[in-house]
Amino acid sequence: MGEKADVWQGTLALMVLKTLETLGPLHGYGIARRIEQTSGDILSLNYGTLYPALLKLEQEGAISSDWGTSENNRKAKFYRITRSGRKQLAKETEDWEQTTAILARFLAGSGDAA
Amino acid sequence: MSWMRAWLFRLAGLWRNVERDREVAAELEAHLRLHIDDNLRTGMSAEEARREAILKLGGIESTKQACRERNGVPFIENLLRDGRFALRQLRQNPGFTATAILMLALGMCASVAIFAFVDASLIKPLPYRDPAELVGVYESIPMCPQCNLSYPDYLDWKKLNKVFRSLEIYGDAGYSVSTAGGLEPSHGTRVSDGFFRTLGVTPVLGRDFRDGEDLAAAQRTVMLSYGAWQKRYGGKKDVLGRAVVLNGDPYIIIGVLPASFYFPPTEPSEFWTAFHAESECDLRRSCHSIYGVARLREGVSVEEALANTQAIAKQLEREYSENKGQGAAVLALSDVIVGRIRPILLVLLSGAGLLLLIAGVNVVSLLLVRAEGRRREMAVRSALGASRGRLMSQFATEGMILAAAGSALGVTAAVWTMQLLTSLISANMLAGMPYLRGLGLNSRVLIFAGLIALLAAVLFSVSPALHLSARGVSGGLSEGSRGSSGNAWRKLGSKLVIVELATALVLLAGAGLLGKSLYLLLEVRNGIQPDHLDTLDVAAPKATYAKDEQLVALERRIISRLKNLPGVKSVGITSQLPVTYNGNTDWIRFVGRPFNGEHNEVNERDVSAGYLATLEAKLLRGRYFSDAEDESKPKVVIINQALARKYFAGQDPIGKQFGDLGLAPKSLKTIIGVVDDIREGSLDSEIWPAVYYPFNQSTDNYFQIVVRTSQAELSLIPTLNAVIHDIDPGIVAFDGDSMGERIHNSQSAYMHRTAAWLVGGFAALALVLGVFGIYGVVAYSVSQRTREIGLRMALGAERRAVYELILKEAGWLTLAGVMIGLVCAIGAAHLMGGLLFGVKSWDAVTLGGVSILLGLASLAASFAPARRAAGVNPVEALRVE
């Protein structure tokens, strides 16, 4: 379970940061819905897994949080991306793109050989 | 960096966890409300909306748990929880907890305290540069393997050797210091010019001796010990260049030695003077009064140095008749300094180690009994889902808490014990062991204590865990807490008890043998009646008392004054008191016997006419000399039994004559009496042949007064001092003490007493712990066999048979422990043979005695549980199960 979760946690963190960068301050529920929607509902997310990931990001200083009021007047905890979070996002995006590019080339290449 | 920040948050989370939990709960609550709102908007019923939201979240509690784990550190939280639980468990069982902690503390205290002494004496390097290169150099004769050098021999050795980078000398010197308040006795050391350079010691103030400064022609100079500088000059810097008058001669102060410097062979020493070879003894090749210390050349071993010095000794033997029969000895300076106390310290350290072993085994058995009792609890917790690891870690936490508490208490007690033991060492003895100044909890001692603590922690946490896991935890539920597992524990417990009893026996035997040695040592025949003798050392300045007649007059005056004091029965004067050392010897040659230049070495004592009678020595033949036998009369001598036996076997020595090696007419003496052997050397040394010359025919500037008193010992000392001062204020009188105290505090008695008492203390504690151990095992066995005993009694067994059953079990354990212990004890005693006096390592009385003692003690300890067993009510015993 550990290894899979790590990969998942890693990509989840990336998605969270991207969401917050795009949409600005947002509460946990909003982030979860946004990820689900963006993935075109392919990704079925247990919303509960989001919260430890948020805690981790906050502990690492990538995001910060404040209690506020939602659009329909509900109290909620809002997360915003910090400067170090933006840096992390940029770096991880680059890494991720590189990885996918390599993999894509690799998979294409091995197809040729076959 | 960010992961570090995250860990800091998580560690911080260990504390504010309630607050954080509340925050997570509020956030999830808000999340659900938002989700429910959305769901309601899509037209779900209120109940459906909530259900769907919770489902999508994946459970509230599991999310909270996931956050909690992210917020804190689960491993540490478990540890803290285990710790709290363990503390609660330990508090619930104060008897067990206190016993376990105290036992470990006891073992720890003994070993750490003794180790600190070992560290200060044997491990801490001497305060010299490269101390491993330093050696002591001696001349050697069969009777005295490490004996003084003579100055002319030293000069030859220094010139001829090829193994020493430098060879220096030192010699004890008694100084009377002229102070504003009159003369004060003090100790000093005469050293050759390169002495401090060879040791690698540089003065903190002023300069070292220059080359040639130790020659007779040079001005007299002195270096102060740091203590003397502080005490006598208040640590003032202007002492340099000032003069201090020692024995009437002015010495210029040129330097002050560092506070860390010490040189045990001549401590306590205040004045370190340049040698100045000018006295008659210094210049005579046959007068041996100094010791050598040298730094080996690079790559030269002690053996090579020995071979070289022995070759030089051989060469000198050919050149000078005085050197006949004289070899050489070289040994590491560390052996010179701590050689005598090393075996004692090692024995004590072993004793403390054995005590620690018993204490440790006892705690382990306690923990095992406890683990056994908690088998059912563990089974239940395991059934409820506690992982094996969690259960084991529970034991580990308890073990570590016990080990930590016991160690902390033990180390604290050790500090206190060190102070106590140091305060028990007499001031004189302590002054001769300056390395004990470094005694304390330094890093080496702390590492030693840490290692023991670590070992204890591992042992205490692993042994109960292993014990339980060995036979599976879950078995406990079905099986109940009795039966095969109880039996298995009994077997293990029995083995541990045998170890304890055997160890206790080794300690008891060691203590018994050392105790018997001490007894025999103090009972050793001295040839004198040591009670009611008061003694006083006297130094008559050479300037005022240069001539023999002056000293004889002084001696007569002192004796006649003291003799008439109330309470004084008789008075004697000697150049050297009994039970001090063999030495101050003379070489004699018998008239009318073939002579090949051999050295007939005999102890020489110059004594007054009443001395031997005052000691109540036993005159075997002939007569004592009279006060009238002085220079004007023919020379006479009294010899001891050992001399008569060695040189006059089967003859009557009375009337026979001997003289010096050249048989100079002036040196010829006639034997007029034979006295029974007086122990001139230390209690554990051999009796050497001895001659007693009349003081009136062989004077000394240093002598000792012995007074037989009818009053309480020591009460006359102030009067003696006053009389001497009244006769001549220029005479220094010091070290007033009773003969009994002198013997009691003599080094050999002191060493044996220390060893006997400390090992005795360890043995007593070991006995208590061992007996406690056997009590525990037998009591546990009885509690496990209650039903069996009830059944036996129901079937008609008598109480006597029950007693027998239990005591037999205890008896076998004891027997096994004693037997194994005896074998180990003989081995151990063999190893400490050097500390035994008059007893063999297999001394049957001692070994038998301690075996019986241990046997009776264990049987007594088993009696209480046996009684309980015999008191079992069969009906109840059967019903209880």
Image (spheres, coloured by chain):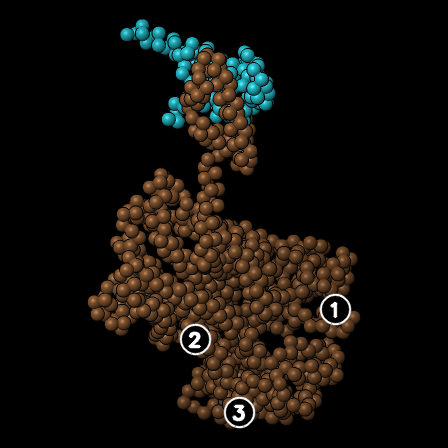
Q: How crowded is mark 3: few (under 14 residues within 10 Å), some or many (20 or more)?
A: many
Out of A26 and B519, give the one closest to the viewer.
A26
Q: Residue at position x 74%, y 74% from top?
A: B183
Q: In this view, does B480 lie to the left or right of B528?
A: left
Q: Residue at position x 74%, y 68% from top?
A: B245
Residue B26 percent location from the top left of the image:
53, 27
Residue B479 percent location from the top left of the image:
27, 50
Q: Colour of chain A?
A: cyan
How many discs appear?
A: 3
Identify the secondary structure beneath mark 3: strand
Q: Residue at position x 72%, y 84% from top?
A: B723
Of the residues shown, which amino acid type is indicated by label 1? Val
Q: Residues within 10 Å of mark 2 (few under 14, many from 20)?
A: many
Out of A90 and B588, give the one closest to the viewer.
A90
Residues at marks 3 and 1, CA–CA distance in whole angstroms: 43 Å
Residue at image mark 1: B245
- Of callouts 1 and 2, which one flags the residue occurring earlier in the amino acid sequence? 1
Q: Which residue lies furthest to the left in this view?
A: B795
Could you say which disc has been placed on residue B672 in the image?
A: 3
In which quadrant of the rendered image does the C terminus of chain B lie? bottom left
Residues at marks 3 and 2, CA–CA distance in whole angstroms: 39 Å
Q: Give me the chain that's brown.
A: B
Residue B661 percent location from the top left of the image:
53, 79
- Of callouts 3 and 1, which one flags the residue occurring earlier in the amino acid sequence? 1
Residue at image mark 2: B516
Chain letter of the residue beneath label 2 in the structure image: B
Out of B336 and B34, give the one closest to the viewer.
B34
